[in-house]
Amino acid sequence: MNPYAQDLLENDVKLRPPSMFEVIIHNDHVTTMDFVTEILTQIFHKTPLDAAALMMEVHELGHGVAGVYVFDIAVTKKSQADLRASERGFPLKLTIREEPQV
């Protein structure tokens, strides 16, 4: 047996799932609804129907959760969306927050 695995068993180490992080997309008065839907389908892999519903939620409520991921993936998806928005001249804002523990 791997000595590291044996040490884990002997010391009764408690493993817990990783923290999860929400990528929040925020409404603004410049970014088009079509572009938001595009980001949600292409980067966050939402179906067109789910992307349209989430885009309307963002439009009406001011923000919405684009997805929930482990930290590294959340940062990567936010960075991809930020880059695409910048390239297209949109001020789209996305933020990351730790998902509340239940």
Image (cartoon, helix red, strand yellow):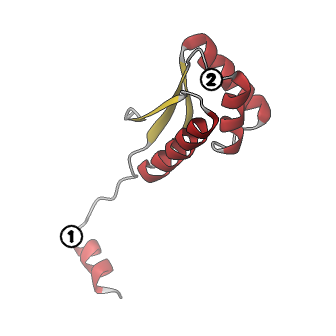
The label shown at residue 31 is 2
In the rendered structure, which amino acid carries the disc numbered 2?
Answer: Thr
Between 56 and 70, which is closer to the camera in this rendering?
56
Q: Is residue 17 left or right of residue 27?
A: left
Q: Is residue 58 above or below residue 40?
A: above
Q: Is residue 74 left or right of residue 19?
A: right
Instruction: Pick whichever of labels 1 and 2 is earlier in the sequence.
Output: 1
Q: Which residue is mark 1?
A: 11
Quadrant the N terminus occupies: bottom left
Between 36 and 11, which is closer to the camera in this rendering?
36
Q: Which class describes the residues within 10 Å of circle 2: few (<14), some (14-19), or many (20+)? A: some
What secondary structure is marked by label 1? loop
Where, by quadrant of the figure, is residue 60 drawn?
top right
Q: Is residue 12 above or below residue 2?
A: above
Please tell me which residue is depicted at 29% across the width and 73% down the height of the picture. 9
Name the spot of residue 81 as percent of width and height, x first.
57, 40
Q: Is residue 2 above or below residue 40?
A: below
Name the spot of residue 58 as percent of width and height, x first.
60, 19
Please tell me which residue is depicted at 73% across the width and 30% down the height of the picture. 50
Q: Is residue 94 above or below residue 74?
A: above
Find the residue positioned furthest to the right: 49
Where, by quadrant of the figure, is residue 39 drawn?
top right
What secondary structure is marked by label 2? loop
The label shown at residue 83 is none
Q: Which class describes the residues within 10 Å of circle 1: few (<14), some (14-19), or many (20+)? A: few
Name the spot of residue 22 as percent of width and height, x first.
47, 36
Please tell me which residue is depicted at 39% across the width and 51% down the height of the picture. 18
In the rendered structure, which amino acid carries the disc numbered 1?
Answer: Asn
